[in-house]
Image: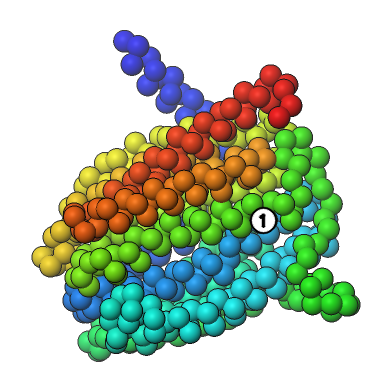
Amino acid sequence: MILTQFLKDFVQELEFIFSSSKRGVKDVLLATAPQAIQLVTGLIASVLIARGLGAAGMGEYTLAMTIAGLTISLSDLGIGQTAIRYASRALSSSDERGFLAVLRWAFRWRLLLVFVLAMILFFLSRWIAEEFWHLERLTFHVRLGIASGVIGSLASIPSAYFQSRKEFARNSTVLITQTLISFSGILLLALFSYWSVEAVLVVGIIGGGIGTVIFMASVPLSSLFSREDSKRGSYSSLLRSPRVERTQDVVDTAEPEAFALYFLASTILAIIILKMDVTLMGYFLSQEEVGQYGVATRFALPLAMILASINTALWPRASSAATLEAKKALLKKTLTMTSALSILVIGYSIAAPLLTPYLFGTAYEKSVFIGQLLCGRFVLAMCASPLGAIGYSFGLVRFFWIINLIQLVCVILLNVLLLPRIGAVGAAVALLVNESISLVMVGYIVWRKLKVLSTGSVQ
């Protein structure tokens, strides 16, 4: 009886929140649209690549794309989210000049980081391939992965402009165009049966390059370059964050430099955590096992995309919410929706990976259980990630990097202990523990901060 009443109240509350948050739901759906296209095309492309390259070739491709993903992630280091945060605040204060200045500052930093990181990884590529992963022929693939990462980094820059303005429809249109261009290259390889790791990587670079040109041309030039910036007098001044009109945020009073510093530390640690699985598998496991893990990750992509869409719509809203009541209301709405969504994720996590041998072939049967674990972690992530996104607006950025450091230590230890014993399943278990730590610790400090603020205490 109590359970029935609870479910009834929960459904009614959910209906109310959805009806009162139509704009937010619409933005999530718009942000999900390109993710859905990427999901469908990505799944088809993954099936074609996995069958065309075989398990060993798929393993080499997965390792090369790990470098591509590392390039994209490390060339951002939280700059994109910081830009969206303060650009959104500038817009909420009708400071158009400050809005554009923030975007140009982020663009300059991104270009600098992409160049420096690409050079470092290029010189390390031979050591990574031959000494760490023990595959001499992988050096060229790693370098192609670096090039792919550079293209992907540049392609993601204009997103800050659209997300800050909450122009999710335009952002989605450009992202869908990029995805379809890249997907057409994979279809051509399948049509002519021209399969090799090099061919797949080169096609991705060409498709990504075309998409990047289109995306960069879709934003105003003033959001990337301005004559005003050339009058600053020194190169170092170009990298300093611009001054913008500040909103009267009664909870989060962090300056852009302080926020960016803490967020940078947190981002670096988070990137290392998420790249640790494949990186250590390349050392401990065979190419075939890495390929099986790579296929298993494909079933987690839809969940990662949905979560990314929620955060895309949530971040500018959390950044522009200036009062405690506004932040609390946003937190309640978001957690209610993501909690309901996580229930659906449980069913998907069990059922979807069972399709692995039918889609990818019997060589990937071991990917089923790995896929279920990787999908299952999003049951926790659906609640933990929004808590973190809104937690930044409570001024908790100075604590999050410590949580990330604890997560990193646990993930490394678990991978080193479990990979030699239970194979790729160990990496999936480590990520489950990682999400558990995030949910418990972030949830606790957000709850504690709310309690302090609600009682009028000063921290």
Colour basis:
rainbow
Whole-percent x and y of residue 126?
A: 39, 84
At 33% from the left and 16% from the top, the residue drawn is: 3
Task: Locate residue 117: give its quadrant.
Answer: bottom right
- Quadrant for the N terminus, please: top left
Query: In the rendered image of this protein, does residue 208 appear above or below residue 316?
Result: below
Answer left or right for 20 relative to 130: right
Residue ranking furthest to the left: 362
| Count of marks placed on residues | 1
Residue type, label 1: Leu
State the image coordinates of residue 32 (x, y, percent, origin top left): 47, 55
Which residue is tagged 1?
A: 261
User: In the rendered image, is residue 199 in sight?
Assistant: yes
> Residue at (37%, 55%) from the top-left corner?
412
Local secondary structure at mark 1: helix
Q: In this image, 384 relative to 399: left or right?
A: left
Write the residue at 58% across / 66% down: 76
Question: In terms of depth relative to the viewer, which is nearer, 383 or 28?
Answer: 383
In which image quadrant can residue 240 be found?
bottom right
- The picture places residue 441, in percent across and down from the top left corner, at 49, 36
Can the viewer see residue 218? no
Residue farthest toward the top in the current orientation of the protein: 1
* Residue at x 56% of width, y 48% of height: 401
Q: Nearer the viewer, residue 454 or 237?
A: 237
Please name whichever residue, 248 or 279, is drawn nearer the observer in this view of the structure: 279
Would you call the spot at circle 1 few (<14 residues within 10 Å), some (14-19), or many (20 or more)?
some
- Residue 31: percent from left, percent from top: 51, 55
The quadrant of the image that shows the C terminus is top right
